[in-house]
Amino acid sequence: MTTTPTPPRIIDVTLGQRGYPVWIGPGLLADHARWRASLRGRHALVISNTTVAPLYMERIAEGLDGLQWSSFLLGDGEAHKTFANVGLALDALAQLGATRDACVVALGGGVVGDLAGFTAACWMRGIDFIQMPTTLLSMVDSSVGGKTGVNLPAGKNLVGAFHQPRAVVADTDTLTTLPQREYRAGLAEVVKGAAIGDPAVFAWMEQNADALNARETAPLIEAIARKVQYKAGVVARDETELGERALLNLGHTFGHALETAGKYKVLLHGEGVAIGMLLAAQLSERLGMSNAADTGRLHRLLDAVGLPTAIPGGMDPEQLLALMRLDKKNLAGTLRLILWRGIGRAEIVSGVNEADVMAVLEAATH
């Protein structure tokens, strides 16, 4: 990856009279003039984690020169996305004396972004925040769209708020320090976006899997931009997930159950989504909605980018189904899943028979 100055790709997320830019490219964290303009007040709290902060906090500090600012660091991992840490982050804002024009800066992956955004949504009933995603997963998914929140022991993301950022600064240079497993987990969300609504991007990924695995700059920026552009359009049409935006959750009901069953220590979010997508495709095939050929293409693409496709050993189908019943998309006590009719044709399906879900889970755990 190069740090040669190049104009970033810019994608605008438009929400009626509101909106914000998503900047994608190398060297953006050090492009202080670009993102500093999004800070409107004199206070800033940088929320990061103990892995990311030593790598990039200094660049952010240079851009915050002249402001009153402090930092709050989480431990690294999904287990730290808790109410307790939100409380500590709010205490940090209080100690800073943050006013209503303060800004929270989220420097890290999806856990940092979700918790920082929720903290910003809570402080004085909502202050600005800027997303600075440092993982591929957060660049292509969680940093865009305004979903924020924390986990409970009962399940993932059960508490949160819709709170849109002022800007998203996706510096692709940060991906050079990303472990391979984390990087591949991010590719799951790119696959998901194509599987939901863009057969052409799906075919492009099949052709460029090797280049994406090698983290080649141009294909990587293209993949991020295509996914963000797709998500921006969906969010613009359905900001609070009353309809179409739910399609972005293909594989998530299965995936969140898998993550929760593993106590957020066995699978990364993107890995859960990858397995979940394949399970959703298998369920769709069982229900006569799709065919084996498309399930096979999905399986092969996930394999090609190094993602898991099997339920980890030791997980119980009954427990997984019980966790799926807690999913936020469910209505009137019945399962409401995102399934598909083949590549690029996802849809919301209500009243899914639990026996069919159990059959798919049991087949995948034996």
Image (cartoon, rainbow, N blue to C red):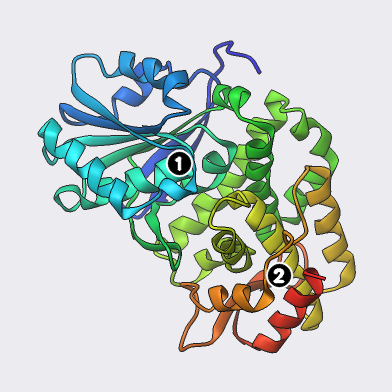
Q: Secondary structure at mark 1?
A: strand
Q: Residues within 10 Å of mark 2 (few under 14, many from 20)?
A: many
Residue 57 drawn above or below residue 286: above
The quadrant in which residue 216 appears is top right
Residue 12 marker: 1
Front residue of this view, candidates 97 and 294: 97
Whether residue 316 is situated above or below residue 76 in the rendered picture: below
The three-letter amino acid code for the residue at tag 1 is Asp
Q: Residue at x 29, y 51 (%)?
A: 84
Query: What residue sits right under mark 2 in the picture?
Result: 280
In this view, 265 is above or below 218: below
Near-viewer residue (160 or 233): 160
Along the viewing direction, whichever of 100 and 272 lies nearer the viewer = 272
Query: For numbered disc 2, what is the local secondary structure?
Result: helix
Residue that lies at the very extreme toward the top in this rendered image: 4
Quadrant holding the N terminus? top right
- Which residue is painted at 40% across and 48% down in the image? 114
26 left or right, relative to 197: left
Residue 104 horizontal/vertical position (percent): 28, 36
For the question of whether residue 176 can be seen, the reply is: yes
Q: Is residue 28 above or below residue 246?
A: above
Q: Does label 1 or label 2 sit earlier along the sequence?
A: 1
Q: Is residue 119 left or right of residue 158?
A: left
Q: Where does residue 20 sit, x and y in percent of width and height?
A: 38, 41
Q: Is residue 348 visible?
A: no
Q: Amino acid at mark 2?
A: Ala
Q: Nearer the viewer, residue 101 or 361?
A: 361
> Which image quadrant is residue 279 in?
bottom right
Q: Residue at x 54, y 62 (%)?
A: 260
